Image (tube, rainbow, N blue to C red):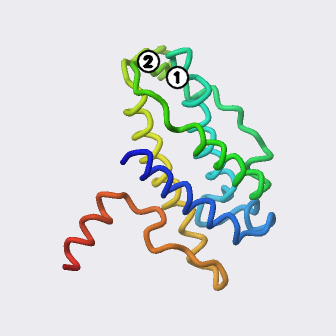
C-alpha cells in the first residue's frame, strides 16, 4: 500500500512535468519565494535517491544530496529520474539509522526503510503542495485536484462526500 501511494504521488508529479516547458520549470516563481518548480522537484527526487543509494549502508543522510542542476532545469531528465526511483522502491524493510547534523550536533536516530519511505511520501506531498501554487495561476496547465494533498485528507474528503 505504501509503495502504491508513493507511485501515485510520483506519477502525478511526472504527469505535471510533461506539461511544462524548460522555461516554466526553471523560472523563479514569486509564490515560491523566487524558487523554481524545478528546485522543488529536484529536492523531492534527491530525497528518494538518498534513501535508495544509502539503503545498503544502513545509514541515511539526506544532507548528502547531489543537488544536481540538471534535475532542476530539465523536466524530461527529472521525469526519467522519477521513473528510476519507482523501479527501485520495493526493498525489504530493514533497520536503518538516520544521520543528520542539527545545530552543530551530529544525530544518529534509529529508523527503518518503511518509516523513511513514509517520510519521503509526506515530504513529496508537501513540496507538491508548494509547486501547485504557481501551477494554479496558469491557464494551460492541468493539475490533478489531489496533487499536493495528503492521502489522509483525500480519504477524509471521500468520506464526507458520501
Q: Secondary structure at mark 1?
A: strand
Q: Residue at x 63, y 39 (%)?
A: 46
Where residue 97 is drawn, which disc sits there?
2
Residue 132: percent from left, percent from top: 54, 67
| Mark 1 vs mark 2, CA separation in Å | 6 Å
- The correct choice, above or below, for 99 with respect to 89 in the image is above
Q: Is residue 33 left or right of residue 19?
A: left
Residue displayed at 74% across by 58% down: 75
Question: CB under 8 Å between callouts 1 and 2?
Answer: yes
Q: Position of residue 91 (x, y in %)?
A: 49, 31
Q: Classify 3 as above or below 57.
A: below
Point out which mark residue 157 bears: none
- Dot 2 lies on which element? strand
The percent coordinates of residue 71 (x first, y second) are: 74, 47
Q: Toward which corner of the image does residue 31 lie, by quadrant? A: bottom right
Q: Earlier in the sequence, mark 1 or mark 2?
A: 1
Q: Where's the C terminus, which quadrant?
A: bottom left
Q: Mark 1 sits on what residue?
A: 60
Name of the residue lying farthest toward the bottom: 139
Amino acid at each position: 500500500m505504501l509503495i502504491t501511494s508513493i507511485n501515485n504521488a510520483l506519477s502525478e508529479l511526472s504527469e505535471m512535468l510533461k506539461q511544462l516547458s524548460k522555461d516554466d520549470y526553471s523560472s523563479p516563481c514569486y509564490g515560491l519565494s523566487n524558487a523554481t518548480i524545478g528546485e522543488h522537484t529536484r529536492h523531492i527526487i534527491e530525497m528518494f535517491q538518498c534513501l535508495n543509494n544509502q539503503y545498503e549502508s544502513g545509514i541515511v543522510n539526506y544532507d548528502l544530496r547531489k543537488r544536481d542542476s540538471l534535475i532542476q532545469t530539465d523536466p524530461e531528465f527529472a521525469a526519467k529520474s522519477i521513473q528510476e526511483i519507482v523501479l527501485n522502491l520495493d526493498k525489504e524493510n530493514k533497520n536503518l539509522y538516520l544521520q543528520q547534523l542539527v545545530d552543530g550536533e551530529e544525530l544518529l536516530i534509529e529508523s527503518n526503510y518503511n518509516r523513511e519511505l513514509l517520510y519521503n511520501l509526506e515530504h513529496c506531498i508537501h513540496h507538491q503542495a508548494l509547486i501547485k501554487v504557481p501551477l494554479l495561476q496558469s491557464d494551460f496547465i492541468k493539475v490533478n485536484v489531489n496533487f499536493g494533498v495528503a492521502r489522509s485528507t483525500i480519504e477524509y474528503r471521500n468520506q464526507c462526500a458520501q
